[in-house]
Amino acid sequence: MLALLLVGATGCPGVVAPPPGITDPDPDPDPDPDPDPDPMPKPDPWITVEAGLTSLTTTATCVDLDPGERVLDVSPEGHLWLAITSTVEAATVRVVDGWSVQNVSTFRLPATHIQVVRAWTASTASMLADGQLFSVVEGDRTVVTAPGPLAADATFCGDPTSAAFVHSAGAVYQREGDAWIEWTGFDDALAADATLLSRDNECAGIDDGVWFSTKDLELWRLQPASFSRPMAIESGHDPALLGDRTLVLADGALFVGPEPWTEYRFEAGDATALATAGAYAWLVVDGEVLRFDGEDFVKLDAAAGVLFPHASGGLWLASDAEVCHFAPDAMLRVEGARSGTQSLEPDFALRVKPSRDVAVTLAVDETDVPATRVEDGWFVFGGALSLGWHELVLEAGGTQRTVALKREPAVIRTFETDIRPIYQEHCAGCHADGANPAAPTIDSYEAWVSRAEKIRARVVQFGDMPPSQSRSPTWGEDQVTVIEQWLGGGVRP
Ligand code: HEC
């Protein structure tokens, strides 16, 4: 039932570069130090965030927590999932809507140990509980077949009924449609304690990467056509993803990467907590809450708590006794598509509702797309998407929300069925092992995956492979299209 995908891990964990500014002893000390007695002052290798930041004023709406009640998750739309696990083999779940905290629903779930929750809406969530994967709808839970036995500290991102990743004791599984596949080749490099990072609860984003973090902050990126790349961030904590960026706190500073890493230090004090959702990262710095949009920081007029931001634009702050919701700007609720999802459909359809009386605009890959109509406060958008990832940026009254959508090729190509025959007929003459010393060997699935980007460049983009003077008469656009579809569809074995 399991297909095996080989993932070569380049580099070895441990021999990795720390981001600038942490512990980067000069690897190549200058043998001839500059004798200039009055050197130009060097710019700081970090950016200083000044203390007097603009404040966002807002009023909080709070809900008391019952004794023993804890936060499970917050949905991208702002629904806070809370639970009390009772001794009678059931958990009482309470869902509070950040848009209107009077909207509360409560139900009981037959679960004793809820491990990971990915909440989608007020009534739907994916869940790992009691060693099993579940899909929860309106308080009912349905078991989702797991790829194998799940360890007590297993984690997942995405929706295990359709598109998800599961990590359990060093094993990595991917759910694609109705099948699980296992990624192998990590050679025990991925520690058993690794967790999956998510973007608004989904796994992949516009960089097509799925991110793992181990307890000692080794960050791994897994991409369909390139190898996972480890990075270690000494004494780092709270790793998070914001679009195609990776954020980590270390030594009281915020690092935004990867490659190059930018370091932000705070005049006000140390950054101690970080969480991301939608277009924003939220931080706790010296007991205050800051919001970062990727460029600028602003301060929220609120006492810090545990951060539970949501893509809709607001923030839940949890303390021991209560949870409070803040919405300094207009919030945007989205129906029709979840950010990070992949679809075969050529068209997208979104319904977007602002929390205030403001107009909503949409730009798809930086081109404005007007709303087709407005009904009951919902702005309706639609259009066609070409293959690949697209960034749908919504804006309303100073707030932004990005929905990343991927359109997959309608034809599913696999290496064995579609690519190997092309290779045999058109490439093997030169690229088989020992055929032509000048041509690198690309005679296996693994070799095609590891050279995927080069194959895309030489065959699809520049069209200079096979070399024009030695093409078989049967080589043509059809073969190029098949290779392009295979690359775009996630290089299936
Ligand atoms: C007539 C011989 C010949 C055929 C047929 C041929 N190649 Fe090549 N290919 C070469 C040679 C020689 C090189 C190395 C020189 C260069 O990069 O141009 C090369 C280089 C490449 C590279 C760059 C590899 C790297 O690591 O830089 C790719 C990718 C590639 N070929 C793909 C293909 C594919 C895919 C096919 C079949 C669809 C194919 N080639 C057919 C001779 C051939």
Image (cartoon, grey):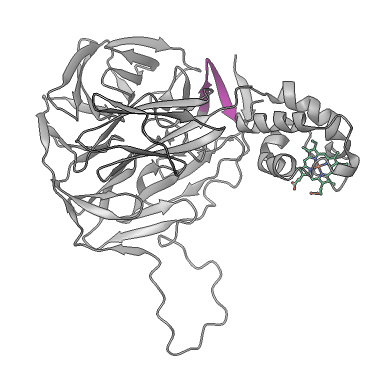
Query: Quadrant location of residue 133?
Result: top left
Judged by its main secondary structure, the magenta piece is strand
Is any atom of residue 165 visible in this view?
no
- The answer to whether residue 383 is above or below residue 211 is above
Image location (x, y in percent) of residue 369: 41, 37
- The answer to whether residue 330 is above or below residue 408 is below
Ligand 1's quadrant is: top right
Q: Which residues are magenta?
A: 172-184
Please say whether residue 181 is one of the residues in the magenta stretch: yes
Please say whether residue 449 is one of the residues in the magenta stretch: no
Q: Residue at x 33, y 14 (%)?
A: 136
| Viewer-nearest residue: 106 or 396 | 396
Image location (x, y in percent) of residue 106: 18, 15
Q: Residue at x 37, y 15 (%)?
A: 135
Of all residues, the one furthest to the bottom in this rendering is 37
Q: Residue at x 16, y 20 (%)?
A: 104
Q: In this rendering, would 36 be left or right of 473? A: left
- The answer to whether residue 439 is above or below residue 444 is below
Q: Residue at x 27, y 10 (%)?
A: 110
